[in-house]
Image (tube, grey):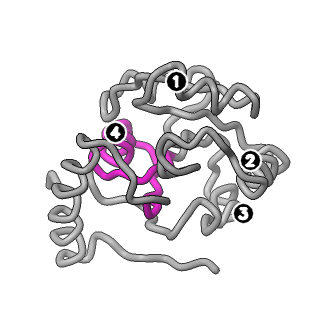
């Protein structure tokens, strides 16, 4: 069934609602995360103290993390370099290549890697095609480029199909 490639394994409000201990328990050691509207607002060059703490928590728990973004080198490097987080820019998600590069850099395997992102058509579809555990987060902001707005319209339709078939459930870990 084609829809299974769009069904995230987990759907939460934000990265801060992800139970990191539960990920660790399932054997996850590596995190591939999107940037825009997953970690920060689209095009925001600023990371928050809360995000820095979340990234520190990941490291303290033994997770390796990499940002995989469809955005350009300038955007991604200006965000990631000060945080010393590795990245793959112009990833062309949902293409498999960027996910494979990220796993190679993390020295990880599909059974030990999670993909976290805000888009079904790029992050979740790409991760699922690679056989990765996937977590969908609600976009941080409605500020998006035209291509993303078009994707969102398609995603709303897919999400309705997934919900009707019991393939999308909301988890709230407050």
Q: What label does residue 55 carry, if any?
A: 2
User: How many neighbours does mark 4 have within 10 angstroms: few (below 14), some (14-19), or many (20 or more)?
Assistant: many
Q: To which residue does mark 1 refer? A: 88
Circle nearer the N terminus (1, 3) = 3
Query: x, y percentage for residue 72?
Result: 45, 22
Kindly identify the residue that appears in the image at 28 percent across and 70 percent down: 167
Q: To which residue does mark 4 refer? A: 126
Q: Camera-side residue: 128 or 84?
A: 84
When the figure is inspected, residue 157 is found, relative to residue 113, above or below; the finding is: below
Which dot, 4 or 1, sits closer to the camera? 1
User: How many neighbours does mark 2 have within 10 angstroms: few (below 14), some (14-19), or many (20 or more)?
Assistant: some
Magenta span: 115-139
Q: Distance between the residues labelled 2 and 1?
A: 17 Å
Which dot, 1 or 3, sits closer to the camera? 1
Circle nearer the N terminus (2, 1) = 2
Circle nearer the N terminus (4, 1) = 1
Q: Quadrant of residue 23 in the image?
A: bottom right
User: How many neighbours does mark 1 have within 10 angstroms: few (below 14), some (14-19), or many (20 or more)?
Assistant: many
């Amino acid at each position: 069934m084609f829809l299974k490639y769009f069904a995230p394994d987990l759907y939460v409000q934000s990265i801060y609602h992800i139970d990191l201990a539960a990920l660790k328990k399932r054997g996850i050691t590596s995190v591939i995360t999107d940037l825009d509207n997953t970690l920060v607002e689209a095009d925001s060059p600023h990371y928050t103290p809360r995000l820095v703490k979340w990234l520190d928590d990941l490291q303290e728990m033994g997770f390796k993390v990499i940002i995989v973004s469809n955005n350009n080198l300038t955007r991604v490097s200006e965000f990631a370099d000060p945080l010393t987080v590795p990245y793959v820019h112009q990833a062309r998600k949902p293409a498999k290549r960027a996910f494979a590069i990220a796993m190679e850099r993390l020295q990880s395997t599909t059974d030990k890697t999670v993909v976290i992102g805000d888009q079904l058509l790029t992050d979740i579809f790409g991760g699922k095609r690679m056989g990765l555990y996937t977590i969908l987060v609600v976009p941080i902001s409605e500020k998006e480029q035209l291509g993303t707005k078009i994707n969102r319209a398609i995603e709303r339709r897919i999400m309705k199909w997934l919900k009707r078939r019991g393939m999308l459930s909301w988890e709230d870990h407050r």
